Amino acid sequence: MNPAPAKPLPTVFVIGDSISVHYGPFLRDALGGVFRYERKGGEMAALNNLDIPEGANGGDSRMVRACLEERLSDGTFQPDVLLFNAGLHDIKRSTHGKSIQIGLEDYRANLLAIVDGLLRRGIEPVWVRTTPFRDAIHNSAKCPGFLRFQDDLEAYNRAADEIMGGHRVKSIDLHGFTNSLSDDPAGLFADHVHFHPEIMARQGAFIAGWLACWLELSGR
């Protein structure tokens, strides 16, 4: 008797900012044999300048929404899980007028539209909470061109928490997990907002562990 064909692996699709580009290879490797890993393409373009969203860098919530709406218009786009994040680009402020890139209400509207589109298609959305930074490090002369503030990050994370909770969308607290890895900013940050490779690796493993637990509990 021929053995039954192996059950195909479920697919996880990832879209997020440069933080997700960095932890992505570690996540992909940790998910080997458990999930088929896909993401918004163009990793080399994303790495050219981590502060300018190109290629695999999903950018702000408006860009993530537009990308997913385009993909959802293709009836063949049907990952089992869609891991998504936006926030760090939304809260960029100009160095002069300090206007914010995406206002909080527009951010809410973009996340709501993303969640609604995924749920209507029957794709499981999983939100990844936006990772931390330190104002004093980020807004130094080493990061010219724009500012970010922790108060904005906390407000936008709270807004996302409310939306995901209200729609019973599961969240991965990458923010809290990353903060727990070191009390010393030098132990976390390689620059103004990105992390050392060992931190990226632990982020990828953390998300992979969460997804593996979800898969087991869901019975898929």
Image (tube, rainbow, N blue to C red):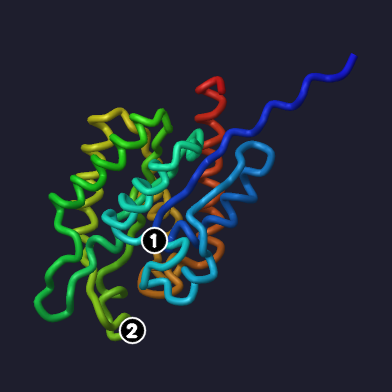
Residues under labels 1 and 2: Cα distance?
22 Å
Image marks 1 and 2: residues in contact by CB distance under 8 Å: no
- Closer to the camera, 165 or 45? 45
Q: Position of residue 176 (x, y in %)?
A: 36, 48
Name the residue that disc number 1 marks. Answer: 183
Which residue in the rendered view is the most extreme toward the bottom?
A: 141
Q: Position of residue 151 (x, y in %)?
A: 18, 59
Badge 1 crowding class, 10 Å Cα cut-off, few under 14, some 14 to 19, many 20 or more, is: few
Which quadrant of the figure contains the N terminus? top right
Name the residue that disc number 2 marks. Answer: 142
- Left or right: 10 as drawn, with respect to 153: right
The residue tagged with tag 2: helix, strand or loop?
loop
Which of the two labelled residues, at mark 1 and mark 2, occupies the earlier sequence position? 2
Residue at 39% from the left image edge and 47% from the top image edge = 84
Q: Amino acid at mark 1?
A: Asp
Q: Position of residue 9 (x, y in %)?
A: 64, 34
The residue tagged with tag 1: helix, strand or loop?
loop
- Closer to the camera, 151 or 93? 93
Residue at 43% from the left image edge and 76% from the top image edge = 49
